[in-house]
Image: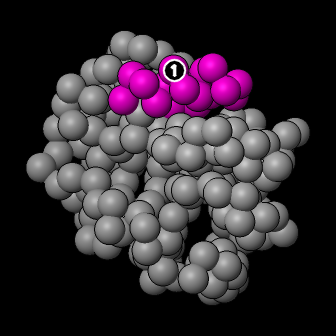
Amino acid sequence: MSERTFSWELFNKAPLVGIIRNVSPEDVKRILPIYREAGLTTVEITMKTPGATDMIRYALENEHYGLNIGAGTVCTKDDLDAALDAGAQFIVTPVLSKKVIKSCVKKGVPVFPGAYTPTEIFQAWSWGASMVKIYPATALGPGYIKDVKAPMNQLKLLPTGGVGLENMDAFLKAGANGLGIGGQLFNKKLIQDKDWDGLKAHFLQFAQKLA
């Protein structure tokens, strides 16, 4: 496990988890400094991405300053062990796995497990989740976040899936404690074209919405 730990101070500066999925190691090396320069602070590399553990290691060795580096799509204890061995500073899951959550809590690693119904959300929270990822947030929208938090405002919620520039404000106003954004943030065309200036301008739009 990494000695460098997750910084809530950094996360709270820009409460957004950028989800890197199926991006090449070469492109990730270019993206991380741009991401930080734009004022974004927290990035998750999904374990389904080829070479994910090597990318996490690289990020922690070379780009850790000013960034939280985590692992996403952690579904099993094996995924968790591999992610933590690579040095992941936080863990994101798409599903509720008691074993994964409890293991993270025991190790003092922030964990954002995926849940959907009020019962699942509360279950994740009671097992010690740092924040609960509401996934997929697309169908139910910002109103759902507001409805869930009304009776349980102690919950910290991270809507993910279908979140973008056009609805970020609505989710935050509804009480979201952060946002998980993948494809809408890591624009495929800009990355394919190696348009790094364009990508930075794109990231800045998200950072400005959070400011």
How far across and down, in percent of the image, does residue 178 sit? Answer: 56, 57
Q: What colouring style does the render use?
A: one colour
How far across and down, in percent of the image, does residue 46 sit? Answer: 52, 39
SS state under label 1: helix
117 in magenta: yes
For label 1, the residue is 123
Placement of 202 over or under 191, stated as above or below: below
Front residue of 125 and 55: 125
How far across and down, in percent of the image, does residue 27 sit? Answer: 53, 62
Residue under the image location 63 percent in, 55 percent down: 176
Front residue of 164 and 210: 210
Q: In the drawing, does residue 94 fall left or right of residue 108?
A: right
Please report the bounds of the magenta region as a residue range.
Answer: 113-128
Q: Residue furthest right?
A: 139
Dot 1: few (<14), some (14–19), or many (≥20) neighbours within 10 Å?
A: some
Residue under the image location 42 percent in, 14 percent down: 98
Q: In the drawing, does residue 8 fall left or right of residue 117?
A: left
Placement of 19 over or under 74, stated as above or below: below
Residue under the image location 48 percent in, 80 percent down: 39
Front residue of 37 and 115: 115
Task: Give, as a three-letter code, the residue at label 1.
Answer: Gln
